[in-house]
Amino acid sequence: MDDHAPLESTGIEEPLDLVRLSLDERIYVKLRGDRELRGRLHAYDGHLNMVLGDVEETITVVDVNEETMEEVIRIVKRNCEMLFVRGDGVILVSPPSRA
Amino acid sequence: MLGRQGGKIALNLEEQQELDRQVQKYALETGEDFEIYDYGETYDNLADDLEETRDDLNDETFGDIGAGTDFDFASNTRQIAPALKKEEELYIKQNELAGARRSSFASLWGNDGAGQQDSFKNGLPEPSHAASSIWGSFSNTTAKGMDIGGGHNTGFVHDPVFGVGTFALSRPGLLNGNQPSFDEIEAQLKRTAGTQPRLVMQQERKMMSLEEVEAALMNINGGRPIYTEAMIAEQQAKQARLEQRRAERQAKQAELAKHNGLMTQSDKDFINRIQISQLVTDDPYADDFYCQVYTALRNRHLQQMGIPGNVMDSGAGQNDNRRRGNVRTEQRMQQQVQKIVSDARRNPKRTNVTVEGALGKIAVNSVLNPRQLLQVSKRGSTNDAPAGGNSPKPPSPGPVSTKSHTVLGWIENVYTYVLALEQMRRQQPPPPRIGEEDLAREAIQQWNEEYSVLARKMWNELRITVPIGIVHPHPFISILNYSKGKKVIPRVLRHLLPEQTLTLLTMLVANFESLNVCKSEAYGDVQGNQEIELFMNTIVPPIISFVSVAPFRIVAGLLALFIERNNMIWVAGSKPGLAFLTLFLSHAEILKQGQGNYPIPDDREIQQWNELYNRLFSQLQTHFSELFMPKATMAEDIHVWRFLAAMAVGASVDQQHILVTE
């Protein structure tokens, strides 16, 4: 029998390959504009345009009260079945935090 | 000139006074105030630098005919100036007489605002017509009237200083030169309109207020309809609005269609061909994967639901009006595409072109070969690994790990190979025609070699042959723990040799209990259930089809391994485990009765089988009732019952008894 591929080898050569590993897995994406996405990665490309499924978007809004100058933090959540994300708004991509 | 007192041209007193008088006369007539035009010392003496000498040879240059007086309008006007003045006075007298008539003129021009509305109501198309006819006849008379004296005026009094300012004055004067026609026109006006416009307008005004009153009445009386001018006016208004809208639509259509027909059909085809030729590819599955797969899936879906005619090339068809035109253009485009594809296949495009006589090559950019903006060299260069940065690096030994990213890396490598293999399958050289076998042999051989190399690599990547015991869980099991890994197995199996498939199955059976879908507690959460379903849908079916053609020995051997290596109670508590058990048991029974293609197993084998069965039974004894989940629904119970049935088939009387009681 031929030798099997040794246990440690991977095909990872560049950072985008790491994104490739997360295909079809749930990921966490941080976007510009204080937004975060959690969803299943279906597709991506070199620009980091992505197609996500079963997505939950979290927007963090800071309301500043005019008189008292206090900042109130509000969180808005939205759900989408299928979402296309343009790559230039992506800050980071990672597996979801084991919370 | 006024104000040019500091200038070089000196006027004597008389000339100066004459000039001033004329200026004042003009000022009075035109109403302009020339006093304010005081140029002061603004003269810049540039004209003094003009060369006004050496004109001696002008006659020779230009000919000595002279310029004539055709252009000299000012002098012509001066000649007829007295006549003009007389006419002016007459006209003013006329206007004083026609005092009352002026009001109708004024209303014509709408200086009371109501004239505007009037022209739209039914009462008054005529006065405006009359007005235009007035001006029409007037223009005829001007032509005649102007023929006074020599030369001809074009109606323009072109005075170098005062420009066109005096035109307004001359016109009314000319009018009076044709007095009778003027009177006729006035009479016409009076006849048709006269004071009528005012009256009709007032009537209309009353009607409007009537409408308002009626509307108010209706509201009070509770909507009793009054069929009066109000209704008629509404209907008329509605009609007017509709017509307006229709007119707008027609105008818009006309606008859009204004430039129709600029290009001939052949022009349009030419351009379409150019655009399409950029998109044409040899291998749609590789270059246009998603569209192909999407249409394939949709067609399959439509065929399952009901056959809507020809599913092949038809779109959903937006609506009938557009579809008719679309079908024709689609057919035309398809023909063009076919032509282009065949052309492209004959002459393959090159990515760089060398023109004769030029130095070096020119890179031809297209959609599939875009211009590279950055030049980044990959570390771990392109020598040994094939180009295309996603191919797996040659392995390097090191410490063993089953960290997630490693396993995911393996899975991705498997996918790469699977895709490559599928691509190769699509490009499989056709079976040779009789008589050309020798020629084709080489191509087929080459293809076979490449194919088997890739298949080998894929097999290695699956880590199935890693010996058990080094790592827990076994790498192959780790791969199967991911949903990606499960999904790729059916595709992998298509490219494996039968013995490899058997090895795969053996490995799976040997390590079955470490599968994540095997944990009983996986039933609880949603994701676990999904994984289980996925396992049942992707892995179990091909295994079933494999086992159902396997000989008895192998089935028995697999079951033995299964029982030996795994805790049966644990395994039997999971759906996949039950599925496998059911599979083995039922198939063995079939084989024992000789219904398969294999000969009936001999006694020794049956003996071994019975021992095996008894072992299994004794292990599962007293646990049969635990197989049923507490909250299980009917659907989930089915597999348990199926398993029990399989057991019962092979059981002896005692065992059956035990089964039933439990």
Image (cartoon, helix red, strand yellow):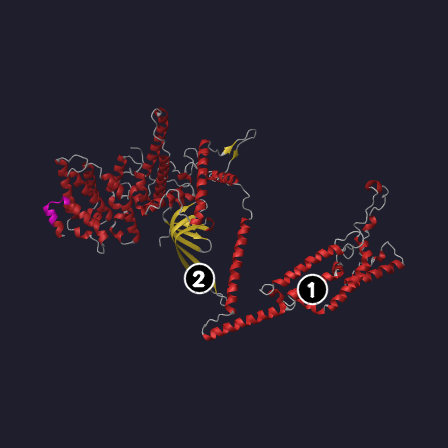
Residue at the spot x=33%, y=38% of the render?
Answer: B461
Under circle 2, the secondary element is strand
Name the spot of residue B96 as percent of width and height, x first: 74, 68
For the magenta stretch, what is the residue range? B649-657
Position of the C terminus of chain A, as image quadrant, is bottom left
Name the spot of residue B328 as percent of width and height, x first: 45, 43
Q: Viewed as shown, does residue B501 lie left or right of B443?
A: left
Viewer-nearest of labels 2 and 1? 1
Residue at the spot x=57%, y=69% of the render?
Answer: B204
Of the residues shown, which amino acid type is indicated by label 1?
Glu
Residue B369 in sight from this viewpoint: no
Say which mark, if any, is on residue A46.
none
The residue tagged 2 is A73
Say which mark, if any, is on residue B186.
1
Q: Viewed as shown, does residue B197 lie left or right of B145?
A: left
Q: Nearer the viewer, residue A62 or B250?
A: B250
Q: Nearer the viewer, residue B112 or B1?
A: B112
Q: Is residue B217 above or below residue A28?
A: below
Position of the N terminus of chain A, as image quadrant, is top left
Residue B420 in sight from this viewpoint: yes
Name the spot of residue B210 as percent of width and height, x first: 54, 72
Q: Nearer the viewer, residue B166 or B422?
A: B166
